[in-house]
Image (cartoon, rainbow, N blue to C red):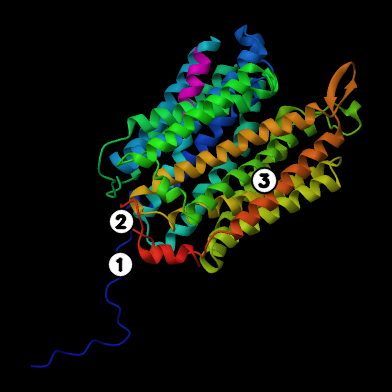
């Protein structure tokens, strides 16, 4: 007997909506990314007063920033690899918990040693974004993945833009410990929310963790970034800085040799050296350099005294509000970035973002005296950063196996961190060499600021060139899923395309 033909146009019962926890996965992960960026910036308004509050020297107090930078750079690739092997949600929860513990320690103590150790613990949160992006790849269908990854990438700028004025307001009107009690509460909420709303990813990398590789990378990066971050204070030609750079070269060379010979390396260098991955990391380093100069220079420029002839003499709260439009722009433009990547490919989005960053610095060079032009230029740079930072994880997702996503994105974030540290040192060197006496104190000249803008703009253009040099994108559903250290012959053909 023939079966009855289906009635045309009858789609059947509607699909049940996803459970509440699944719907909240993206917002919860985005909250974690914003919280991480807020945590990194909240100490900035305190820096001028911390020597008095902690009875420590200014040089010692600067370690509350340096410790977070070093810990974040070292732990990001390590925790990314751990997430690929032992569970991304588990490691993500641990990173947020360490960040929260560090915040509680800051809230309970005024001892500078405790504060530095606490800030180092908070550096673990730098791994939140790459781990979250890896979770999104595993959990979301391809049609939703692009916009979610773009939003996750933009949380870095959004959190930084929110953190500075929020921290300044708290410091101005309350005891400074209140700020850390507030971030402790937010951190606890983040840990609980991830545990409730985020499902553990089933995609794992088997094998044993490369402890020797982790220790070698930690030692090499510590020497490198310590030399970069302290070179201006200690002297670039001083024995300490030269010794650190020499040690970094030696340790990282030995680490590279060890990684190529171990069966299950911390970082798959065979994958990293492929043009599609390696050039993405180079572009990340250059983009991080170009982006970070915007925040550094803008904050100093608008706070410069009016007696300089160009400074606006703004408070730290007003300075944070100047950067706030850039954070809002990053939130609004992240869907556009995902749309461009879906239609044109992420390398085009990355190149476009680098070009927009360069245009923003052209605006900064054209007029850095009027407040509205300063805000406009900074916002244009933030817009370009949104496009670039949103494209970088997508490039990595399309180029690496699924069971190496967190570690590969961790390396990409590490390259951004190195770029930011280098940018900080380069901007400081430029401004130090272009100063004039104002009220008996050396103050950077407007010419020095313009040179810093020009330097960052040129680096942005080089980043765009690196982006266009990346071999053609592969569709998301064609991403390699195997965990082997070598890819197929088809991948080799794509590399040469």
N-term-proximal mark, 2 vs 3 = 3
In percent of width and height, residue 475 lies at: 44, 66
**Nearer the N terminus, badge 1 or badge 2?**
1
Identify the residue shown where x is 49% and y is 13%: 114
User: In the shown orientation, is residue 357 left or right of residue 275?
Assistant: right
| Secondary structure beneath label 2 | loop
With 428 as the anchor, is 73 left or right in this view? left
Q: How busy is the neighbourhood of tag 3: few (under 14 within 10 Å), some, or many (20 plus)?
A: many
Residue 377: x and y in percent read 76, 47
- Which residue position holds label 2? 482
Q: Which residues are magenta?
A: 114-124
Q: Is residue 161 above or below residue 175?
A: below
Count of numbered labels shown in the rendering: 3
Q: Which residue is mark 3?
A: 326
**Residue identifier under label 1:** 15
Answer whether residue 68 is visible to the viewer in this image: no
> Residue 117 lies in magenta, yes or no?
yes
Q: Quadrant of residue 406?
A: top left
How far apart are labels 1 and 2 at the CA level?
32 Å
- Position of residue 429 in the picture relative to residue 268 (left or right): right
Mark 3 or mark 1, which is nearer the start of the sequence? 1
SS category of the residue bearing label 1: loop
**Residue at mark 2 to residue at mark 3: CA–CA distance:** 39 Å
Closer to the eye: label 2 or 3 = 2
* Residue 189 in view in this figure: yes
């Amino acid at each position: 007997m023939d079966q009855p033909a289906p009635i045309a146009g009858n789609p059947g019962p509607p699909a049940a909506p996803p459970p509440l926890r699944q719907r909240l996965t993206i917002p919860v992960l985005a909250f974690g990314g914003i919280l991480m960026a807020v945590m990194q910036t909240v100490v900035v308004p305190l820096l001028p007063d911390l020597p008095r509050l902690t009875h420590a020297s200014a040089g010692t107090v600067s370690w509350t920033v340096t410790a977070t930078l070093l810990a974040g750079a070292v732990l990001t690739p390590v925790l990314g690899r751990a997430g690929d092997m032992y569970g991304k949600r588990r490691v993500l929860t641990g990173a947020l918990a360490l960040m929260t513990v560090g915040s509680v320690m800051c809230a309970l103590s005024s001892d500078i040693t405790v504060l530095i150790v606490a800030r180092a613990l908070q550096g673990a949160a730098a791994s939140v974004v790459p781990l979250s992006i890896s979770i999104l790849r595993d959990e979301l269908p391809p049609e939703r993945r692009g916009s979610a990854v773009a939003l996750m990438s933009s949380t870095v700028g959004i959190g930084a833009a929110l953190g500075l004025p929020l921290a300044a307001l708290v410091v101005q009107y309350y005891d400074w410990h209140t700020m850390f009690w507030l971030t402790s509460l937010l951190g606890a909420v983040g840990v609980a929310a991830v545990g409730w709303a985020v499902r553990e990813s089933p995609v794992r990398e088997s094998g044993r963790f490369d402890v020797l590789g982790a220790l070698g990378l930690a030692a090499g990066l510590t020497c490198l970034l310590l030399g970069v971050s302290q070179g201006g204070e200690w002297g670039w030609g001083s024995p300490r800085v030269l010794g650190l750079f020499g040690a970094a070269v030696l340790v990282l060379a030995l680490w590279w040799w060890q990684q190529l010979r171990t069966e299950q390396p911390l970082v798959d260098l065979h994958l990293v050296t492929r043009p599609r991955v390696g050039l993405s990391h180079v572009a990340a380093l250059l983009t991080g350099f170009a982006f970070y100069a915007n925040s550094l220079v803008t904050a100093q420029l608008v706070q410069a005294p009016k007696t300089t002839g160009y400074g606006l003499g703004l408070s730290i709260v007003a300075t944070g509000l100047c950067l706030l439009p850039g954070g809002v722009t990053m939130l609004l433009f992240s869907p556009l970035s995902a749309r461009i990547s879906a239609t044109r490919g992420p390398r085009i989005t990355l190149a476009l973002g680098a070009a927009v960053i360069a245009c923003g610095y052209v605006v900064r060079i054209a007029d850095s005296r009027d407040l509205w032009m300063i805000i406009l230029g900074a916002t244009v740079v933030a817009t370009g950063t949104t496009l670039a930072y949103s494209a970088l994880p997508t490039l990595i997702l399309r180029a690496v196996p699924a069971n190496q996503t967190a570690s590969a994105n961790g390396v990409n974030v590490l390259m951004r961190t190195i770029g930011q540290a280098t940018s900080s040192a380069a901007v400081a060197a430029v401004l130090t060499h272009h100063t004039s006496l104002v009220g008996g104190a050396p103050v950077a000249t407007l010419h020095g600021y313009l040179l810093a803008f020009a330097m960052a703009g040129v680096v942005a253009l080089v980043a765009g060139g690196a982006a266009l040099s990346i071999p053609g994108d592969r569709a998301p559903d064609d991403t390699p899923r195997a965990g082997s250290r070598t890819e197929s012959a088809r991948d080799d053909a794509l590399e040469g395309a």
